[in-house]
């Protein structure tokens, strides 16, 4: 799941969102070098999470 668009099916949010959040947490807590590639991955995951939350009207607490 790398390309989200306006056709995203919110029925998938209950599985996609926890998966993306988990990936983000793993990256942020990892011990690897935090270079530009790492920052790009973090930003990409954050953008995907925000897109799903906005598109599917999900609050941050959900």
Image (spheres, grey):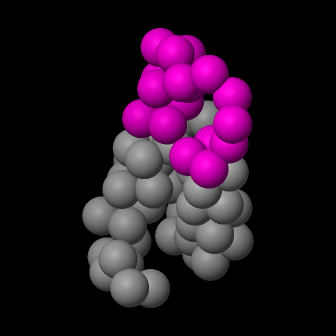
Give residue 41's quadrant in the image: top right
Q: Is residue 7 visible?
A: no
Q: Residue at x 47, y 23 (%)?
A: 40
Q: Left or right of 25: which side holds 40?
A: left
Q: Residue at x 52, y 16 (%)?
A: 35
Quadrant location of the N terminus?
A: top right
Q: Residue at x 62, y 22 (%)?
A: 33
What is the chief secondary structure element of the magenta stretch? helix
Residue 44 higher or lower than 39, as above or below: below
Q: Is residue 3 visible?
A: yes
Asked if residue 53 lies in the magenta stretch, the reply is no
Q: Residue at x 69, y 28 (%)?
A: 32
In the rendered image, residue 29, in percent from the top left (x then y), is placed at: 62, 50
Residue 45 x/y as whole percent = 51, 43
Whole-percent x, y for residue 31 in the image:
69, 36
Question: Residue 23 appears at what percent x and percent y?
Answer: 67, 51
Q: Nearer the viewer, residue 40 or 26?
A: 26
Residue 41 left/right relative to 57: right
- Which residue range is magenta in the image? 27-44
Q: Nearer the viewer, residue 38 or 59?
A: 38
33 inside magenta stretch: yes
């Amino acid at each position: 799941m790398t390309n989200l668009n306006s056709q995203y099916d919110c029925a998938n949010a209950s599985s996609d969102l926890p998966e993306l959040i988990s990936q983000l947490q793993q990256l942020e807590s990892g011990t690897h070098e935090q270079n530009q590639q790492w920052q790009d991955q973090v930003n990409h995951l954050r953008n995907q999470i925000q897109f799903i939350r906005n598109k599917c009207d999900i609050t941050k607490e959900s």
